[in-house]
Image (cartoon, helix red, strand yellow):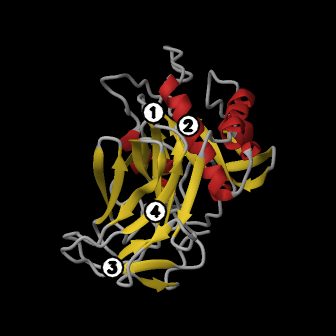
Amino acid sequence: MASIPWLADVLRAEGVPVVEEGDWLNRKVTGSFDPIGVLWHHTAAFSSPTNPHPALNVVINGRSDLQGPLAQALVDYNGVFHIISANRCNHAGASRGSGPIPAGDGNTLMIGWEIDYGGDQATDQAMTAAQYNNSLKATAAVLRRLGKDASYARGHRETSTTGKIDPSFIDLNVMRSDVAALLNAVPSWSAIVDNSTAGRFTASANWGTSTYSTTRYGADYRYANPVSASDTAKYRFAIPSAGNYRVEAWYASNSGYNNAAPYIMATSSGNQTVHVDQRTGGGGWRNLGTFNFNAGDFDAVMVSRWTSGTGYVIADAVRLTKV
């Protein structure tokens, strides 16, 4: 694995607030990158509501003694993940081995979160609840993507060969246990409708079938040219009870696909539309938001061809999860 371009979308799908910092897809340092786990750090900078990410510039650009980027993401005071790099970063140094993480090049082996709080400063500042909770969610999301369990999340002080103490003021075993709980959690209700799900997906003959993009969900997906007319691909769900549901889309992506594909949610208060750039970010669940639906068996989500965007509109898979 030379890159993790899916990082922002995977975090959003977990409900983590994300800010993409500049050209993060190409920002990197030289060297190999084949991550198998997540490494937690603290920045040793004092953050606050009025200065929520004091170390952001340093983590992006580095220091006089260490080339940036210094982590794949920085977690600010409010728990917002600032995505800095999809590639190798100078955050871990040499790993002495910890849990299932072997000894070796930590920058190759791990994806790093720099959690922006004082840690060992005179203020003795610990991470905020928002930083802690969203770090758990983000770690669980990435480990799920990598196919790893919670033991592959480590603290820098557990892997460092030079006596690092970060992240401070946290029991790492408890933090791992909390990640494990998220990984093992069973949603109260969740369902997936793919374009091949019998009786649950419908589309007119104007929607073709393709296997071109390898980022598809399942065996194939549907595509159609944009038009100024109502011709939706429909996803039917048997929603068990009225309430709030997270809607996620999985789509095949390609540079020639639509830059503003409309996803229409048939909510309890009327249709709500979210436009998705399908040129990038495919191959994983993308969070479209949380919406209130009535109970019943109906077309809860639709993908429309009516868009001012250019390129094929893609209809692949949709997931609803009660929250």
**Residue found at x 57% / y 39%:** 137
Residue at numbered disc 3? 312
Q: Secondary structure at mark 1?
A: loop
The dot on residue 255 is none
C-alpha span from label 1 to label 3: 36 Å
Counting residues from the N terminus, which is met first, the one under dot 1 or under dot 2?
1
Residue at numbered disc 2? 135
Residue at numbered disc 1? 79
Q: Secondary structure at mark 2?
A: helix
Counting residues from the N terminus, which is met first, the one under dot 3 or under dot 4?
4
Counting residues from the N terminus, which is met first, the one under dot 2 or under dot 3?
2
In which image quadrant can residue 56 be found?
Answer: top left
From the viewer's side, name the closer residue of 130 and 161: 130
Residue 218 shows in this picture: yes
Q: Position of residue 207 (x, y in %)?
A: 38, 81
- Number of marks in the image? 4
Nearest to viewer (mark 2 / mark 3)? 3
C-alpha span from label 2 to label 3: 36 Å
Amino acid at dot 3: Tyr
Q: Position of residue 20 (x, y in %)?
A: 37, 51
In the depicted structure, whether residue 31 falls above or below residue 223: above
Residue at numbered disc 4? 235
In the depicted structure, whether residue 231 falls above or below residue 147: below
Nearest to viewer (mark 1 / mark 3)? 3
